[in-house]
Image: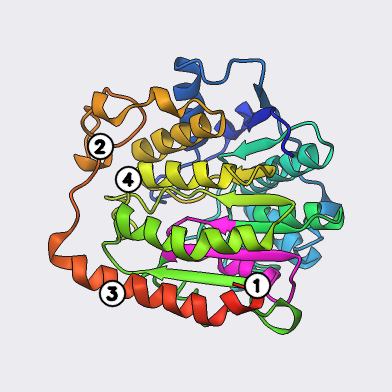
Amino acid sequence: MRNSTKIFLHSEKFQDYGYPAACPFNTSRAGKTKDILESMGLLSGDDRREEEPVPADRVCLEKFHKPSYLHHLKKASDGALSPREYGMGLGTPDCPVFPGMYEYAVLASGATVTGAKLILEGKVGIAFNPSGGYHHAGPEQASGFCYINDVVLGIITLTEAGRKVLFLDVDVHHCDGVQDAFYRRKDVMTISMHESGRTLFPGTGFEEETGEGEGKGYSVNLPMPVGTDDEAYLKAFNEAVFPLMKAYDPDVVVMELGMDSLSGDPLAHLSLTNNAYAEIVEKVMTLNKPILATGGGGYNVENTTRGWALIWSVLCGDQDQHDPSIGLGGVMLGTSEWRGGLRDRVLLSHGGLRKEIDSAISATIGKIESLVFPVHGL
């Protein structure tokens, strides 16, 4: 049974840090999401509140990351770069070094861990950290804008308390760091819906990656073809993902809600509207399990912040006030001249790609039904 209290995890200290201007990753997104929510009165109410996160401490960080990596991460953050740091992925175009990098990563990770702890204490039923979702980071490797893997740390916090966790990732990029962390375990099921690694970083996340040893059948990957729209994406979710979520029956659901699957994202090639995200979150909520949600990617800042604001409204049960008929724009027009509700208008499907997309999605569903469903009695 899920506690009715929802928390939005955010700190004004996030405003003090930022990736270099040339980097697509924009740390202002969480603060801008909060601004939208405050302007709409969505952070006010007896059942919700904003929560100040606690930075992750060294003991917590070392539950996944190597001490030597944390040392070099802090060293690089302080301006000292050597071949050793470069070898760990630091100082690259996708993991640039910037002042306060270490402090930012530790605070962002701490926000996800704070949410996990409050869920374990029974104080909240839903926690959302839009500044989280660094699913590419490895034990001693920075990758894909990610330095510390808050998702893994949040899940470890839950599993150490004996909770069975299902991690659902709808970021456009495959959650390679999280998958690797739990690839041999069955107390954590990872499900990732992402653009195929054939066309997008990190080049992993194919259907055949289903886990090893005790974890065989507990890693699930649904690679999506270029141009996948709401209809095709939701078909994959409804036919392959949700049956597995119900069969696994987790104690806690952890979600990564990167908004880079939206149409027009400059770093990816899917064609979703935020209505697909909203429908997925609504369906996950019917499981009546505690939910720990994070942000993730999303490189059209305006579409991303509006999408996260919509997600928060869905988590709070306020989504009905955001009728897509009252506004025209969002990802449909790729314009800032949009003054409607939080929802995007429905996009016209890619008629020329419809047959190819449907065929690819059906093939992926078939592989999941063959490779994974039998493990869970489906």
Label 1 vs label 3: CA separation? 25 Å
3 or 2: mark nearer the eye? 3
> Position of 148 compared to 262: left or right?
right
The residue wearing badge 2 is: 345
Q: Amino acid at mark 3?
A: Ser
The picture places residue 48, in percent across and down from the top left corner, at 64, 23
Name the image quarter holding the N terminus.
Answer: top right
Q: Residue at x 57, y 74 (%)?
A: 373
Name the quarter where the C terminus is drawn: bottom right
- Which residue lies under the disc numbered 4? 273
Q: CA distance from mark 2 to mark 1?
A: 37 Å
| Front residue of this view, candidates 21 and 339 | 339
What amino acid is labelled 1 in the image?
Answer: His
Which residue is drawn at the image coordinates 68% and 75% (left, top)? 183
Q: Are marks 2 and 1 in contact (CB under 8 Å)?
A: no
The magenta segment: 168-194
Q: Nearer the viewer, mark 3 or mark 4?
A: 3
Q: Point out residue 358 in the picture as x, y percentages from the top left corner.
A: 28, 69
For label 1, the SS is: helix
Please report whichever mark, 1 or 3, sits nearer to the chain's N-terminal start: 3
Which badge, 2 or 4, comes first in the chain's sequence?
Answer: 4
Q: Earlier in the sequence, mark 3 or mark 2?
A: 2
Amino acid identity at mark 2: Arg
Residue 16 drawn at (x, y percent): 58, 33
Q: To which residue does mark 1 refer? A: 376
